[in-house]
Amino acid sequence: MQIKNGLTFFDGKFVSADVSFDQKITAVGANLAPDGESFDATGCYVVPGFVDIHTHGAMGEDFSDGEASGLQPMADHYARNGVTSFLGTTMTLSENVLTKAMHTMRDFKRSGGAKLAGVNLEGPFLCAAKKGAQAECNLHKPDVAMFDRLNEASGGMVKLVTVACEEEGAMEFIRTVSKTCTVSLGHSVADYETAMRGFEAGATHATHLFNGMPSLLHRAPGIIGAAFDTGASVELICDGLHIHPCVVRVTQQLFGERLNLISDSLRCTGMPDGEYIFGGQPIELKNKKATLKGTDTLAGSTISVADAVRNLVCFGAPLEAAIYAASTAPAKAAGLADIGSIETGKCADLVVLDRALNIRAVFVDGERV
C-alpha cells in the first residue's frame, strides 16, 4: 500500500514524500516506485495517527464502566477522529470497580477502529482539595501494592498513573512505580519544592496542566514551574474552555515538544445535551460544556484530539507543533515506542488531512478504517 503526492510530516516538518507500508511503514521518500494499491493525497497532509493518552470515554460509553460492549464503539469513535491509539483512562473509584475495568481492557480484542495501547489510571491517588470531578469518597493514599494489583489485573497494560505528590507515601510510590510506567503529577496542591521532589523521585509528566493544580504565580510556580524546570512532559485540554487561548499559546511556547494534546473526553462526547454519569457522579452537558450537575466545575471535555489540533492552530501555534503534540509527544510520554511518527519500521498508523485539517483517511496498522 502507498500514500502518494501528499505533504508528509517527517522528522518534525512537512516534506513532499510518499509513504509505503504493509502493517509497518516500509519506505518514506519522494517519488517511490509503485507498491500495490495507492491513495492519492494530492493537496493533503499525511501525518502520524493521533495518540490520545487521556480519554475517559465517548458515544455514551466509559472505560470505568468495565463493560466489554462499550470498548468497540469507543475505538470506532477515536478512529473516525484520527486517533489510531489510545489509553483507556479510569477515574477515582473503588478498587473492585477499577479491577473490573482493568480486566475488560485486558481482554479487549478490537474489530477495526483505533488500538487500545494501554491504561491510564487518573485516580485514585489524588488529593481532596483538587479532586475536580473525582469522587472524594474513593480517594486513596498512594499505595504501591494497590497499583501492582490493578496493573496485574490489566495484564501489565498500565502506561500512566497520576499521583498527588504531597500525599503521605507519595515519594516512595513515585520511586517504585516509575520503574513500571510513567508517573504524572496532578490533582494536587503541591508547591514548587514538593513538586520538584516528586519529579526528582521519578515522575516525568503532568496531568492536564493548569487544571487540578495551583496556578503558576510569580512567587509560587507550583507544579507548572517544576515541570518546566525538570523537563517533564505536560498535557493540555485545548478545548477553549479549560484553558484560555492566550495561556495555550504561552504553554506551547514554554514547553515546545514536551506539550501533549489530550481530549480528556467523557462518555457524553458525540452525544446530545443532557445528563450523564461520570465517575459515579451526575454531570450535565450543555452546548459542548460538561460540568458536575448543579455546579460550574468542569468535568473533562467533549472534544477529540483532532479538535485539539485544529484549536491549537487556530489559537496561533504552528501546524507542525500541533501535529507533534498530538502524535509523537504523547507516544513518547507513555513509552509507546512503535507508534507516533512516520518512520520505517514503525506501525503504519497514518492520517490524511485536507488543508482545512478535516480527516480524509485513517489507516491503523496499514488497514484503512
Image (cartoon, rainbow, N blue to C red):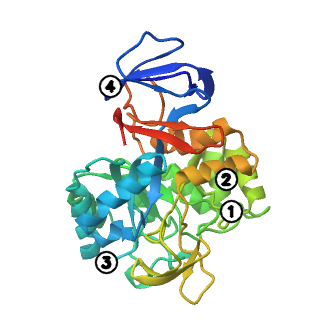
Tag 2: amino acid: Asn
Q: Residues within 10 Å of mark 1 (few under 14, many from 20)?
A: some
Looking at the image, tell me whether mark 4 or mark 2 is earlier in sequence order. Answer: 4
Looking at the image, tell me whether mark 3 or mark 4 is earlier in sequence order. Answer: 4
Horizontally, residue 219 falls left or right of residue 120, namely right
Label 2, label 1: how far apart the Cα atoms are: 8 Å
Label 1, label 4: how far apart the Cα atoms are: 38 Å
Q: Which mark is residue 94?
A: 3
Tag 3: amino acid: Ser
State the SS at label 1: loop
Q: Which mark is residue 22?
A: 4
Tag 4: amino acid: Asp
Looking at the image, tell me whether mark 2 or mark 3 is earlier in sequence order. Answer: 3
- The quarter of the picture where residue 44 lies is top right
Label 4, label 2: how far apart the Cα atoms are: 32 Å
Q: Which residue is mark 1?
A: 240
Q: Residues within 10 Å of mark 3 (few under 14, many from 20)?
A: some
Is residue 149 visible in the rendered image? The answer is no
Discs 4, 2 touching: Cβ within 8 Å:
no
